[in-house]
Image (spheres, rainbow, N blue to C red):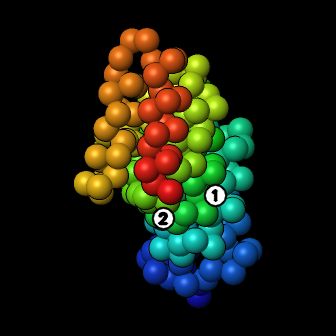
């Protein structure tokens, strides 16, 4: 007799990681049952990088619960393939999604910095991008990156940031090249 998804452990769910089961797990992210959602998210995280595209699609969908679960999973997978959607999510109207996106970029670390600096230069006028970039640059774990990003953080913390941010970001980009 087959176990229900609620009775299966995370490893068993993750072991069934063909594309059909990934889509099934993605669908479970919108379940009304919290245990089903958590098990599906954990299984997707365990599967890892193969789920990034499906999670990215879910994150851009309309179901609020599924979007949150997708953002949470992407923040935990730590796969550079998620950088683009996470940077884009920094502009989402939902604070929780922006926060999770920033956490995901922090977890990915150095590979996320250059795309985020580029977005910051392009969207200097976006309060949400500035807040997200500040969150990432402030909490990034690499001490060498912290030193390079210090002038960008300083510019983000000054009230007249629209002028200073692009220059600081360009300088940081040059230092990273």
Instruction: Find residue 145 and name its label.
Output: none
Q: Percent position (x, y) of residue 172?
A: 44, 43
Q: In terms of secondary structure, where does tag 1 sit?
A: helix
Q: Percent position (x, y) of residue 46?
A: 48, 73
Q: Residue 143 is drawn in which quadrant?
A: bottom left
Q: Is residue 4 visible?
A: yes
> How far, Cα to Cα, is label 1 from label 2?
11 Å
Q: Quadrant of the N terminus?
A: bottom right
Toward the viewer: 74 or 152? 152
Q: Residue furthest bottom?
A: 1
Toward the viewer: 150 or 115? 150
Label 2 Cα crowd, 10 Å radius (few <14 / some 14-19 / many 20+): many
Toward the viewer: 24 or 120? 120
Q: Percent position (x, y) of residue 155?
A: 38, 25
Look at 35% across and 34% down and name the residue there: 151
Label 1 Cα crowd, 10 Å radius (few <14 / some 14-19 / many 20+): many
Q: Residue furthest top?
A: 160
Look at 50% across and 57% down and name the residue there: 177
Q: Which residue is mark 1?
A: 55
In this rendering, is residue 31 above or below 95?
below
Q: Which residue is mark 2?
A: 77
Q: Percent position (x, y) of residue 4?
A: 56, 73
Contact, mark 1 vs mark 2 (Cβ under 8 Å): yes
Q: In the rendered structure, which disc, 1 or 2, sits on the residue that comes first in sequence?
A: 1
Q: In terms of secondary structure, where does tag 2 sit?
A: helix
């Amino acid at each position: 007799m087959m176990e229900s998804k609620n009775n299966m452990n995370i490893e068993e769910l993750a072991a069934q990681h063909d594309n059909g089961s990934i889509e099934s797990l993605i669908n479970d992210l919108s379940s009304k049952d919290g245990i089903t959602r958590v098990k599906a998210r954990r299984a997707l995280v365990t599967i890892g990088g193969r789920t990034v595209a499906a999670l990215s699609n879910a994150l851009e969908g309309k179901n609020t619960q599924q979007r949150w679960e997708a953002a949470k999973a992407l923040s935990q997978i730590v796969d550079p393939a998620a950088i683009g959607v996470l940077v884009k999510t920094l502009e989402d109207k939902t604070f929780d999604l922006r926060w999770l996106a920033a956490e995901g970029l922090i977890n990915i670390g150095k590979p996320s910095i250059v795309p985020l600096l580029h977005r910051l230069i392009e969207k200097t006028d976006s309060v949400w991008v500035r807040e997200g970039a500040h969150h990432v640059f402030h909490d990034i774990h690499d001490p060498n990156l912290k030193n390079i990003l210090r002038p960008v953080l300083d510019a983000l913390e000054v009230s007249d940031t629209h002028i200073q941010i692009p220059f600081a970001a360009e300088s940081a980009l040059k230092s990273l090249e």
